[in-house]
Image (cartoon, coloured by chain):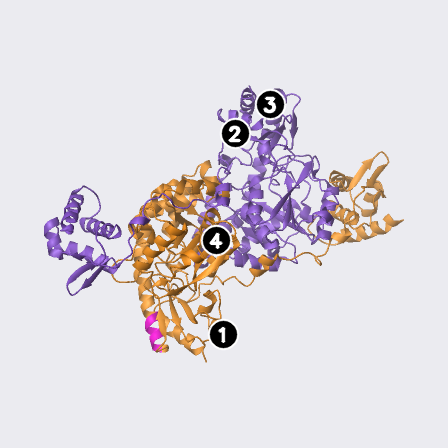
Chain colours: A orange, B purple
């Protein structure tokens, strides 16, 4: 009898050592036998006492397994006992071969990740060792001490009112942004904020102008939202738009980094700021001002205020993040919308994404109101300035005659080389020396014609170690 | 002289009370005058001492304003003094009229938001007042006490290893999911997890089958990723796929809720589970198993294990969330991928989204390992079961003859009415009585032919109050 052979095998398997109780193992073995077709549809099972005797198990353990399999539909109990249900055979279901793979767009994302390293010269990473996590964790603790059910639920779509108020106050004072709490929206990170702009303000197929070179993650986000990207060149005064382009290839969105162009570090000139706003307004386009590097200003005098604040109700969406001033893992960013758009935008946002982290948002509002954020800022600004100076000096010493770009704000400098420089090979050689330098050419949409060099973040590089670290960059060239 | 009139006006404005220092106000007034064209390109400004005398200000305050405007490019300092820069006029830039609005897809999201209420009968909301937030906040505090720079940076794209291990262990034990830590991925909420499936496993224009009626937020997410939705009807045994459909309209993805169909509450039968897997495998499709309601099982015996665990390496992606067992604001969910796909999926995920909340992830791993999550689960299961029983009894008393669907798992029941029932009007009338009931017809892709009734969540309804609350539903009908 077929069942005899199966019972012998089950008996052997039950004798094997393991943590799983024997009744559970019997259940699984019988289930697998049905799924594999070894117990075919309609086959009658022996009585529970027969199985119990053969397997040296208590009868109620066998009954447990039978009952579970009846409840799940594998077996059917009838007047004659228990039989296997009429089920499609599942043998062909198992095994990973022949399963479909990633989608084309999914496959295109492979190899796109950047290492999330805190090694020296990783661009865009603040010095997380100097983050006042004790003060921050006290704010969190306090927010948890005051928690109510509503803060555990989804957060209000535009953010916690206390944080919206704190952000509006902060941006008005620090960046000259025109913003009431109702016009500022909290989102789960800069990437989500940019995606909200792409989806809520543009439709698939719409054109978006991006800086060339620019930020690949931003490009991928815009592309993922179905927009058609067109690169606009950047020079020493920032994005360089030809007036005719507004008519010949009008965009729906223009994404810019006026305070410190990423990666080249240009500051968008006043003349171009005004022309950009006038052009966008005439073309019915939105300017997305990504003020990603605004937190740290290293120039003389005070920083140039945000483009957004230049005129009231201009066609500008202001985007900023807490990743640098707080820490990247916090995943909180903000958008400022013109008064005329803010209510509609808030409503659409509520229909798009479920927000959370209300407790963290309240803690952050408290961290800002207590002055802890500004204190942290005041402590870090001279640290970063000193690191930039050390990096400049070391680059001048090791790479005489090379051009060093950027630095009026932010946390990185660009060492620009000749057009023939193979910056990717160089960066690979550098990576073997416990230093990270990004090849400048990875930031271009057309890497073959993009400028060459290294993008060097000084956020996590100790000033005293910078000369030795730069020496490693030079060594890796040969 | 034109400048005289402007100076008079500035003088008047400076005399107004306000918090902003006078030098800052002078700077802003002059800037606005340039932007508005009242000080035209090339116009010469009086000397700082003249302005100081007229405005009764210290000369260095006037110099501060002039220097800031020179630095920003509004004014130019030359040998003769200070003149206005050659700038495009910005008068036309101001004013919100004529700005573009939302995109078409953005406008389509308006009115789509559901109130994030914790009122009785709001579906899908757990009782957040009973969440052990003190134990949870101790885990957070402990995780913050052990924090290092790397946990403040972006989180590893698939999640913190400790949480991945805890989730794999939890799912194997509780849901019979076949999962190693490398096959489980942590994402920022169920919506992001579903979007990751849509983007990484399907391309724009690909067909996705969804349950009809189903979950509108899931449909919006799939649509937002460019997929073409086709509704598949649901009956008492779950999604009801015609075998021919696999050939005539083959999908790339099939999204199902086998444990407790949302909203109707059917459990997908074993026969259909096997046929679904066989059909998907033959068609080269992925089944997305959304186990959203798995956390609470109210049936006899033990819950039917997940579809994913039925066979090894089946064409199934398993999706679950911590929103119910923890709290919605946490924004953490998980995906389990087949072994053959997991490495590629992880790589694509890293290229798609920046992850965060590493500290919270470590705290959650600790919360799970300490047994606190299972304790919370054991406490809540009988609470929710009692609420469901109270709701059933009250519905039977107030709506004799109506059909009540679902309830083997999850946190809601469906009260189904006649096809002629205007469930939306009824839900509106109910909303005026401090109770929330969702009209069943909002869950259909074609509301006119969709079943009618009320979706009633019992997660936040106190069992003793349920009879009185159900009485309000009945009152609102007339």
Same chain check for tags 3 and 1? no
The answer to which of A254 and A299 lies nearer the viewer is: A254
Which chain is home to disc 1? A
The answer to which of B362 and A347 lies nearer the viewer is: A347
Residue A396: name its quadrant. Answer: bottom left
Which of the numbered marks, if any, corresponds to residue B436?
2
Whichever of labels 2 and 4 marks the residue nearer the N terminus, that label is 4
Asked if the residue under mark 4 is in contact with the one under mark 2, i.e. CB atoms within 8 Å, the reply is no
Q: CA distance from mark 3 to mark 1?
A: 72 Å
Q: Nearer the viewer, mark 3 or mark 1?
A: 1
Q: Nearer the viewer, mark 4 or mark 1?
A: 1
Same chain check for tags 4 and 1? no
The kind of secondary structure the magenta stretch mainly shows is: helix
Taking B16 as reference, is A209 left or right? right
Which of the numbered marks, if any, corresponds to residue A425?
1
Asked if the residue under mark 3 is in contact with the one under mark 4, i.e. CB atoms within 8 Å, the reply is no
Residue extending farthest to the bottom is A478
Q: CA distance from mark 4 to mark 3?
A: 45 Å
Whole-percent x and y of residue A164? 37, 43
Whichever of labels 2 and 3 marks the residue nearer the N terminus, that label is 3
Taking B420 as reference, is B245 left or right? right
User: In the rendered structure, which segment of residues is drawn in magenta?
Assistant: A391-397
Residue A214 in magenta stretch: no
Whichever of labels 4 and 3 marks the residue nearer the N terminus, that label is 4
């Amino acid at each position: 009898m077929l069942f005899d052979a199966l019972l012998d095998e089950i008996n052997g398997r039950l004798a094997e050592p393991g943590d799983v109780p024997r009744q559970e193992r019997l259940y699984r073995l019988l289930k697998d036998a049905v799924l594999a077709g070894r117990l075919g549809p309609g086959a009658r099972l022996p009585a529970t006492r027969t199985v119990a005797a053969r397997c040296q198990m208590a009868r109620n353990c066998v009954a447990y397994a039978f009952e579970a399999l009846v409840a799940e539909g594998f077996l059917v109990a009838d007047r004659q006992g228990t039989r296997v249900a009429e089920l499609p055979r599942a043998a062909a279901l198992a095994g990973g071969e022949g399963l479909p793979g990633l989608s084309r767009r999914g496959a295109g994302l492979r190899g796109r990740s950047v290492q999330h390293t805190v090694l020296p010269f990783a661009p865009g990473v603040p010095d997380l060792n100097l983050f006042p996590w004790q003060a921050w964790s006290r704010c969190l603790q306090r927010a948890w001490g005051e928690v109510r059910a509503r803060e555990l639920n989804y957060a209000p779509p535009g953010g916690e009112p206390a944080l919206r108020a704190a952000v509006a106050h902060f941006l008005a004072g620090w960046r000259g942004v025109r913003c009431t709490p109702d016009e500022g929206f909290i989102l789960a990170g800069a990437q989500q904020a940019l995606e909200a702009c792409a989806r809520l303000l543009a439709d698939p197929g719409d054109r978006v102008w991006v800086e060339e070179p620019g930020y690949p993650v931003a490009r991928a986000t815009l592309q993922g939202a179905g927009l058609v990207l067109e690169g606009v060149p950047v020079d020493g005064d920032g994005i360089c738009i030809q007036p005719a382009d507004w008519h010949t290839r009008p965009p729906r969105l223009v994404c810019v980094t006026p305070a410190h162009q990423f990666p080249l570090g240009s500051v968008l000139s006043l003349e171009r700021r005004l022309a950009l706003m006038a052009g966008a307004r005439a073309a019915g386009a939105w300017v997305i001002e990504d003020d990603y590097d605004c937190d740290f200003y290293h120039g003389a005098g005070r920083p140039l205020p945000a483009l957004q604040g230049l005129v009231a109700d201009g066609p500008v969406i202001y985007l900023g993040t807490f990743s640098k001033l707080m820490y990247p893992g916090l995943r909180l960013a903000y958008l400022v919308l013109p008064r005329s758009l803010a209510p509609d935008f808030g409503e659409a946002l509520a229909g798009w994404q479920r927000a959370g982290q209300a407790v963290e948002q309240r803690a952050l509002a408290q961290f800002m109101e207590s002055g802890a954020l500004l204190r942290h800022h005041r402590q870090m600004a001279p640290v970063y300035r000193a690191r930039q100076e050390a990096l400049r000096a070391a680059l001048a010493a090791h790479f005489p005659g090379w051009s060093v770009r950027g630095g009026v704000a932010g946390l990185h400098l660009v060492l620009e080389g000749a057009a023939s420089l193979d910056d990717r090979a160089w960066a690979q050689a550098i990576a073997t020396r416990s230093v990270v330098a990004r090849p400048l050419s990875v930031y271009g949409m057309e890497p073959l014609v993009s400028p060459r060099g290294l993008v060097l973040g000084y956020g996590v590089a100790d000033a005293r170690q910078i000369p030795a670290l730069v020496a490693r960059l030079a060594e890796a060239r040969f």
